[in-house]
Amino acid sequence: MSDLFVEITCPNGQSYKQPTGLFINNEFVAATSGEFVESINPATGKPICKVHAAGVEDIDKAVKAAKAAFPAWKQMDGCERRDLLLKLAALVERDRDILGALEANDSGKPKDSNAVYDVDEVVALLKYVAGWADKLEGSVIPAGPNKFAYTIREPIGVVGCIIPFNYPLAMFGWKLTALAAGNCAIFKSAEQTPLSVLYFAQLFKEAGFPPGVAQVVSGFGRVAGDALVKHPDVQKIAFTGSTATGRVIQKVAADYLKPVTLECGGKTALLVFDDADLEQAVKWTAFGIFYNMGQICTGSSRAYVHESIYEKFLQELKAHVIAEYPQGLPFEDGVVVGPQVSKAQYDKILNYIQSGKDQGARVVLGGKVPDRKDLQDGYFIEPTIFADVKQDFKIVEEEIFGPVISIAKFNTDEEAVSLANDSIYALGAALFTKDITRAHLVAQQLESGMVWINSNNDSDVRIPFGGNKMSGNETRELGKFGIEAFTVAKAIHVNLGNKL
Ligand code: ADP
């Protein structure tokens, strides 16, 4: 087998052919950079394989392919684009099991309780945006006697989509919206998790997408990502990742007046009022911070609980996590919590845990790596619950991006809102109450881009996703807002006879 494909056997015995090249013009090619990204299995710390890393020249090649494909893709009847996206969805459904397995191997997500759901998310997204491909309409605007204008929604052109490590398939999936709107795209995976999207790339060709419509490349952020942001023929960047990198990208893109969709960090606050359904509040709280090992931008890493139910909530949350969030290897039956994605993330999270202890937080659960011998080489951290935290603790102020929740008590509704809003981030917020008036009044006062009433981290491809303050800009992914963000409005003025 050439070095553009390697045979990989996952720990559960499933074997498959992993592409390692850059997917440009519907073919895998070697990178001219001569550089590689090494993919590591986070459950063992051992390398899986190396994939080609795009350099500046490679990005230029990918952009040229997308630019050449754009006029025909833009002109294509939306119904044809819809059918291609539906065909792609069917192929992803067909390959659900292998995509789930290779994602579990590469990212550490437990296969059956986590990785396969990311595949389902891509399918849901593809079916949803396929429905938009033939429904992008404008409007007619009367402009006095004998004059009017109409607007059309046009694709932007070549777009660069930069993908994070926490949801390699799902975040790539959200950005497939670009294609439904008639753009051609270059998708760049995160260094830690290049494998699933490269495997996926073959499905574009199999579904019948014309060459050049979708490129998939691996590569380093400061090289390949930066080259995409700086390329004059890339007319938009859609980015999901850390706030630090989002700031860099917005600055670089500013030189080219390039629009950017930014979906960055978060510090979701979750409020539990005294009249809440405690069992539900406990379940959703755990889900929002311990699912996906807490590597969730909307992870509910802060909870504020009414003082009258504070201790009860802590004990019930602890019991629920012990019972429902077993930790182990990604291919082990019944496991919900796997390893963190990389050694760097593992070290960072353990430092935060130490700082929580040093600053005086009470450890209710976890706060360490697991004792199991067979987990020692991987990047495993126990689900951790801290109580009695103060607003100026580092674990309360900063995004940890791991399985760590910080909990404090409140007394009045005003205090709860003020604590929730006391953050540089404003991505998600959640609240639990049975009082309908309180629920909506509080939801409106929370500064975040999304609020969940009596649920948490419950996303849906039909509902806009995004944040304010240091969590992003005014752009949104998903839903109608998501497809509009990949289009521009053109106004066409019509004069039926007025003479100048
Ligand atoms: P993290 O710090 O959590 O790994 P990043 O925000 O750095 O997350 O990475 C998210 C994505 O952004 C990855 O695909 C990464 O390669 C890319 N990236 C990192 N730095 C840059 C940059 N300077 N320009 C463009 N993309 C970048």
Image: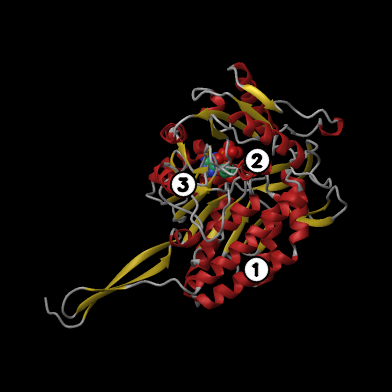
Front residue of this view, candidates 465 and 17: 465
| Vertical comparison of 459 with 275: above or below | below
Task: Give the mark nearer the N terminus: 3 vs 2.
Answer: 2
Which label belongs to residue 150?
none
* Residue lying farthest to the right in this orientation: 13
Q: Is residue 340 visible?
A: yes
Q: Can you tell me which quadrant of the image ligand 1 is in?
A: top right
Left or right: residue 88 compared with residue 377: left
Secondary structure beneath label 2: helix
Does the Cβ of the disc 1 residue fall within 8 Å of ligand 1?
A: no
Left or right: residue 7 compared with residue 399: right
Marks 3 and 2 in Cβ contact (< 8 Å): no
- What crowding class fits label 3: few (fewer than 14 Cα within 10 Å), some (14-19), or many (20 or more)? some
Q: Is residue 21 visible?
A: no
Q: Which residue is mark 3?
A: 439
Whole-percent x, y for residue 314 in the image: 64, 31
For marks 1 and 3, give the CA distance.
40 Å
Whole-percent x, y for residue 300 in the image: 57, 39
Q: Which residue is mark 1?
A: 88
| Vertical comparison of 15 with 364: above or below | below
* Residue lying farthest to the left in this orientation: 500
Quarter of the picture containing the C terminus is bottom left
| Vertical comparison of 390 with 32: above or below | above
Q: Which residue is found at the position 77% from the left and 59% from the top?
A: 97
Whole-percent x, y for residue 451 in the image: 49, 47
In the image, which is nearer the foreground, mark 1 or mark 3? 3
